[in-house]
Image (cartoon, rainbow, N blue to C red):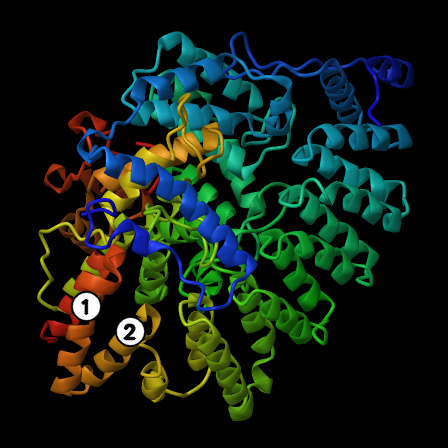
């Protein structure tokens, strides 16, 4: 429920509201509701008086419902919550109530992070995040917040099974693939040959399911990067796919280019040939790029 | 050659499902169908040469909106300088002279949002915010008058910027606010435009941005998170201003950037397996002039025969992007959109037009002059930002000749 101008005047009547001043002829003025403009006038006055009170807290709830992107109001709300030593678990419910309609709002996620950090309690967080991801499995803020939770509270155990469920549901979920990389490689000491091999096997399997899906192809590169292994070993894997599959063709260009750099002229010729067919036939939207790659491979290096 | 006059028939360009239909695929094909219908109409009437930028309609949309917005726009009440910037920048790209009264109204409004402790808030009485300050300073720079410049309290602006800087080189968006790559780019853009950049403001910053480059090659909002078109532009532009682009893996970034252009739609997605969105015409499209110059520098350094050094080497399909913007992203009632059948807004109008300018025009960085300044020890961020110039011979415009919009030097996103 939002406060009417009447409520506002009776609750905050002892403060002198500060009207908005945008100059004489502002661009794109907004036709505010009276509720909002009155609430804002009192808010500015409370901030000026540095009043941190229950009624100031109520006013911030009210304004945030009108405009959840009001970062100044969120910031003041945090100060009030901490000054009055309010129940922060209750605050998480307030955020949750808003998240349903505003899942992509920067302020809301940041506020939640500030509160949870203060609470030092992450028990409700993964469930909260999962609910948001249930509606939109690629919500950038939710993933970003999840990574903060993982790191800050050292919570890793649920992650791989969770990612696996998401990838079974939608193997094209690039955010889930990115998170897999984040989780698998968070502990550099834990990286060994068997981990690398099992990630390679997992990813190859997913690629075989959907060769046209760039996400696991990119992930495979990410895995190799973390190991001492060379992309050369993927040559036979890439050849499993039909000769019009643009992802495997792009890989073969890299593989042959590497070989060409070591003086293999046949590989150089092969790489150039694939660039040409990508440029002219299979991946024409990226013609300029493949021609550039071709020129790079063909150019004599110093 | 774009998509409509390209070698592959339109019907063959739909995304394949490989026998595995998922939510991502379904959304993708729904979008493709919407765009396909619009492209088919142009093909059927053989009208590609008459594709038109509806300049007057967009001007009307921008100017009528700037007179006033209804109460539902209250959700943008903490982004008032943004609205100003989106409108002013869009008008500027469309070649519209900004009326003195209009300009004065904007300048007076922005001056009310400046705080005595430095920086601009998102509205009257609001905390100073990096994004709001970026929008305010860039709008004032578009005006370019003494009156506009005089608004900015540079001394306190500098103190405020320094107060947002984190020990790891990143920036928080406002006092008590969140960290991400936008913050760095906004801070740098502001500091360069107002000529207050010092080594303290960028100490540790290139190293922090480098950590945001992911295994995919793009740049995410913070270290660890998925690469994203918007953050990638902010990250690369910031690196280029600092003269530290070479710290990034550029060939990986390039491969990721080219992968984001959609084969049927011609526009860009912001992340792999996400949908096309007109705003990435700028965020991703704007990467290419930067990548072009970085690559060229690299070739010169390696003393490789610079490959076609005089020719334009923008490595995306410039015609296809124009097709998306002009055929799929123009709203009938004026303004431009994310994707059909959505309605227009100021944000998408601004960034679709910025993207159009990036696709049509060619800007080049004066590498020789840069080396000369470097030898003299004078190559700083301000100098770098001024070394971009238009190369008229590199223009490429689809449809009517008068579709050409004003050329922008993209690194600072204003003039």
Where is residue A164 shown, x and y percent of the image? 62, 73
Q: Is there a contact, CB below 8 Å, between mark 1 and mark 2?
A: yes
Q: Looking at the image, can residue A2 be seen? A: yes
Q: Is residue B272 above or below residue A216?
A: above
Q: Do marks 1 and 2 both belong to one polypeptide chain?
A: yes
What distance separates the C-alpha of mark 1 from that of mark 2? 9 Å
Image position, residue B312 (x, y; %): 15, 49
| Protein chain holding label 2 | A
Residue B328: x and y, percent?
36, 36
Q: Which residue is mark 2?
A: A249
Q: Which mark is residue A112?
A: none
Taking the spot 44% from the left edge, 68% from the top edge, the residue there is B18
Of mark 1 and mark 2, the one earlier in the sequence is: 2
Asked which secondary structure carries label 2, the reply is helix
Count neighbours of disc 2 (C-alpha within 10 A) and say few if under 14, some if 14 to 19, many if 20 or more: many
Q: Residues within 10 Å of mark 1 (few under 14, many from 20)?
A: some
Q: Write the residue at 43% across / 70% down.
A: A218
Name the residue at 18% across, 58% down: B296
Given the image, what chain letter belongs to the residue carrying mark 1? A
- Looking at the rendered image, the quarter that the C terminus of chain B falls into is top left
**Residue at 80% across, 24% down:** A46
Q: Is residue B201 visible?
A: no
Q: For this rendering, which residue is in front, A208 or A183?
A: A208
Q: Position of residue A252 (x, y in %)?
A: 28, 78
Task: Give the residue at mark 1.
Answer: A277
Residue A22 appears left or right of A130: left
Image position of A192 with respect to B2: above or below? below
Choose between B193 and A243: the one closer to the eye.
A243
A171 left or right of A78? left
**Quadrant in the rendering for residue B249:** bottom left
Label 1: element kind: helix
The answer to whether B172 is drawn above or below residue A14 in the figure is: below
């Amino acid at each position: 429920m939002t406060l009417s101008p009447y409520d506002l005047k009776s609750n905050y009547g002892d403060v002198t509201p500060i009207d908005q001043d945008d100059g004489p002829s502002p661009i794109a003025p907004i036709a505010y509701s009276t509720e909002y403009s009155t609430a804002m006038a009192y808010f500015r006055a409370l901030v000026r008086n540095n009043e941190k009170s229950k009624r100031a807290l109520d006013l911030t709830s009210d304004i945030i419902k009108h405009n959840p992107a009001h970062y100044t109001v969120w910031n003041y709300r945090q100060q009030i919550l901490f000054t009055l030593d309010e129940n922060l678990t209750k605050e998480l419910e307030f955020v949750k109530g808003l998240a349903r309609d505003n899942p992509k709002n920067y302020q809301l996620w940041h506020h939640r992070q500030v509160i949870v950090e203060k609470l030092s309690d992450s028990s409700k967080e993964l469930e909260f995040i999962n609910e948001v991801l249930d509606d939109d499995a690629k919500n950038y803020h939710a993933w970003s917040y999840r990574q903060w939770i993982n790191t800050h509270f050292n919570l890793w155990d649920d992650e791989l099974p969770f990612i696996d469920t998401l990838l079974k549901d939608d193997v094209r979920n690039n955010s889930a693939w990115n998170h897999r990389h984040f989780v698998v490689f968070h502990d550099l000491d834990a990286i060994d040959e068997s981990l690398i091999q099992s990630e390679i096997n997992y990813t190859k399997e997913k690629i075989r399911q959907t060769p046209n899906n760039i996400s696991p192809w990119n992930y495979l590169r990410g895995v190799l990067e973390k190991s001492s292994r060379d992309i050369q070993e993927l040559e036979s894997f890439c050849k499993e796919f039909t000769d019009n599959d643009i992802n495997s063709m792009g890989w073969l260009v890299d593989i042959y280019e590497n070989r060409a750099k070591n003086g293999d002229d046949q590989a150089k010729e092969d790489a150039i040939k694939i660039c040409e067919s990508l440029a002219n036939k299979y991946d024409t939207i990226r013609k300029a790029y493949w021609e550039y790659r071709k020129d790079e491979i063909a150019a004599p290096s110093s | 050659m774009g998509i409509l006059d390209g070698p592959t028939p339109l019907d063959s360009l739909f995304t394949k499902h490989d026998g595995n239909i998922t939510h991502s695929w379904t959304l993708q094909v729904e979008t493709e169908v919407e765009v396909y219908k619009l492209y088919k109409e142009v093909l059927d009437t053989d009208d590609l040469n008459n594709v038109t930028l509806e300049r007057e309609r967009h001007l009307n949309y921008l100017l009528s909106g700037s007179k006033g917005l209804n109460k539902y726009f209250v959700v943008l009440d903490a982004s008032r300088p943004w609205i100003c910037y989106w409108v002013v920048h869009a008008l500027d790209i469309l070649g519209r002279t900004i009326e003195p009264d209009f300009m004065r109204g904007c300048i007076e409004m922005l001056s009310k949002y400046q705080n005595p402790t430095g920086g601009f808030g998102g509205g009257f009485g609001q905390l100073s915010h990096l994004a709001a300050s970026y929008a305010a300073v860039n709008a004032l720079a578009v005006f370019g008058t003494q009156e506009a410049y005089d608004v900015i309290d540079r001394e306190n602006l500098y103190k405020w910027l320094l107060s947002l800087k984190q020990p790891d080189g990143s920036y928080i968006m406002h006092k008590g606010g969140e960290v991400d790559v936008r913050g760095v780019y906004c801070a740098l853009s502001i500091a360069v435009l107002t000529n207050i950049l010092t080594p303290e403001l960028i100490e540790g910053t290139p190293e922090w941005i480098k950590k945001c480059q992911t295994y995919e090659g793009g740049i995410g909002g913070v270290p660890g998170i998925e690469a994203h078109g918007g953050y990638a532009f902010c990250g690369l532009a910031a690196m280029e201003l600092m003269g530290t682009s070479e710290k990034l893996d550029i060939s990986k970034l390039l491969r990721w950037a080219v992968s984001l252009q959609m084969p049927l739609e011609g526009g860009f997605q912001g992340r792999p397996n996400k949908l096309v969105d007109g705003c990435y015409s700028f965020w991703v499209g704007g990467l290419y002039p930067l990548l072009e110059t970085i690559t060229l520098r690299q070739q010169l350094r390696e003393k490789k025969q610079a490959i076609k050094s005089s020719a334009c080497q923008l490595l995306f399909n410039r015609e296809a992007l124009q097709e998306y913007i002009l055929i799929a992203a123009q709203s009938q009632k004026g303004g431009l959109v994310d994707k059909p059948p959505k309605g227009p807004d100021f944000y998408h109008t601004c960034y679709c037009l910025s993207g159009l300018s990036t696709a049509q025009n060619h800007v080049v960085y004066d590498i020789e002059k840069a080396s000369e300044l470097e030898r003299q020890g004078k190559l700083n961020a301000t100098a770098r930002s001024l070394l971009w110039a238009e190369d008229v011979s590199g223009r490429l415009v689809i449809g009517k000749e008068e579709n050409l919009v004003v050329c922008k030097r993209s690194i600072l996103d204003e003039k």
